[in-house]
Amino acid sequence: MSTFQAPKGTYDLIPPDSAKYLAVREAIAAPLRNSGYGYIETPGFENVELFARGVGESTDIVTKEMYAFETKGGDRLALRPEGTASVLRAALEANLHKAGNLPVKLWYSGSYYRYERPQKGRYRHFSQVGAEAIGAEDPALDAELIILADQAYRSLGLRNFRILLNSLGDKECRPVYREALQTFLRSLDLDEDTLRRAEINPLRVLDDKRESVQKQLGDAPLLRDYLCDACKAYHEEVRELITAAGVRFEDDPKLVRGLDYYTRTTFEFVHDGLGSQSAVGGGGRYDGLSEMIGGPALPSVGWALGVDRTVLALEAEGVELELPAATSVFAVPLGEEARRVLFAKVTELRKLGVAADFSYGAKGLKGAMKNANRSGARYTVVAGERDLAEGVVQLKDMESGEQTAIGVNEIVAELESRLG
């Protein structure tokens, strides 16, 4: 037993389960790569102020959940709690918005960190795949991202998820709603911290998950009743485009999500089979974030989908992913000459793209065949001194049990043919 264990609220991805996570990441990324999104990777930590300005100083993420620290040089850094601010910072720093091809379409995959109470579906270290379209204000772009996420989930076999959709207005109409909401919240029986939050960003109170708060919000004014004509028209076009694509969604006038930078379109993907941690992903439009972090006006939209939550959703629906075999061919040499010959054949198979493995450690036939069985290989190649003297190896079909002698120089072509 090791002296050390993974930190509380974290997890290790270990074969064979790790293959599911890789498959989920690939499935989410595939429609993005087919839609003009290029891959971006950012550091695991950033300047604290990037998240304080972008995510919002009143959010739980910044005030309670962010892992912040000071370097020996005096810099204040934080492990990234989300991806959007980092991606936008990187795009601005590289001047991608000046290349003349807007929107800049980027996708990313990585680990994120929040100091939260660990529970199933909520970890202190978690994995997301995200997408951002930077520099264009177009309802079709919002619709595109929602459709691509829906496509990714359905390609995995998920069916019992729901898409919640709302509009948060813009700088023209939201201030009027903000004032009306603050007036309503001041009349409620709320604790001092919640009232303080209401003065900074009252929409955050609507996102409060505590029952004592939610039961008082039944008569809260709804943002949809305060939207200006431009925001109404924008939101209606997003709805029409999604509907025309055959994507089902639910209007949720109370959906605000937990980040301060959202404007207009906001959406969330939820799965009712996950209990209290039902959100598997979400996103929205963030037209003012670039200015918040010191850049030019760049209206943008994006989302992040949780890999961990998606795996849990698949398990809740009983969906078994069709994963490629980790090993298709397993070589079992008996003797030094056989080791040399079969190792060369395994290397040749690998170069051709065939998943092949080898019995290491000079095991006897019985032990080596046990390893072959555990590997899940479809075929096992066995060779001893007598086989090589006759110029053959033994090819065993692990499903049927049939064993055939094949010429040493023909075995690679034979396996390639059989495996397609």
Image (cartoon, rainbow, N blue to C red):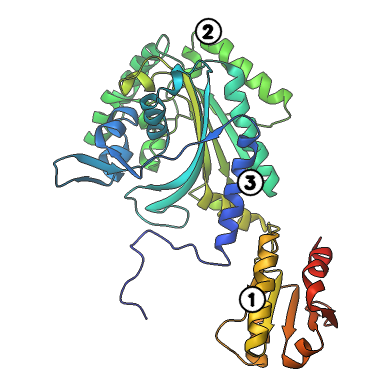
Dot 1 crowding, Cα within 10 Å, few <14, some 14–19, many 20+: some
Of mark 2 and mark 3, the one earlier in the sequence is 3
Residue at the spot of label 1: 343
Residue furthest top in the image: 229
Q: Is residue 71 visible?
A: yes
Name the residue carrying label 2: 230
Instruction: Say whether residue 386 is left or right of residue 358.
Output: right
Where residue 204 appears, x then y in whole percent?
36, 30
Residue 25 lies, with reference to residue 253, above or below; the image says below
Q: Which mark is residue 27?
A: 3
First in sequence: mark 2 vs mark 1:
2
Q: Is residue 229 above or below residue 325?
A: above
Question: Residue 49: x and y, percent?
Answer: 25, 32
CA–CA distance in space, label 2 to label 1: 68 Å
Query: At label 3, which amino acid type do we have?
Result: Ala
Type of amino acid at the residue the image marks with label 1: Phe
Vertical arrangement, residue 357 with respect to residue 86, above or below = below
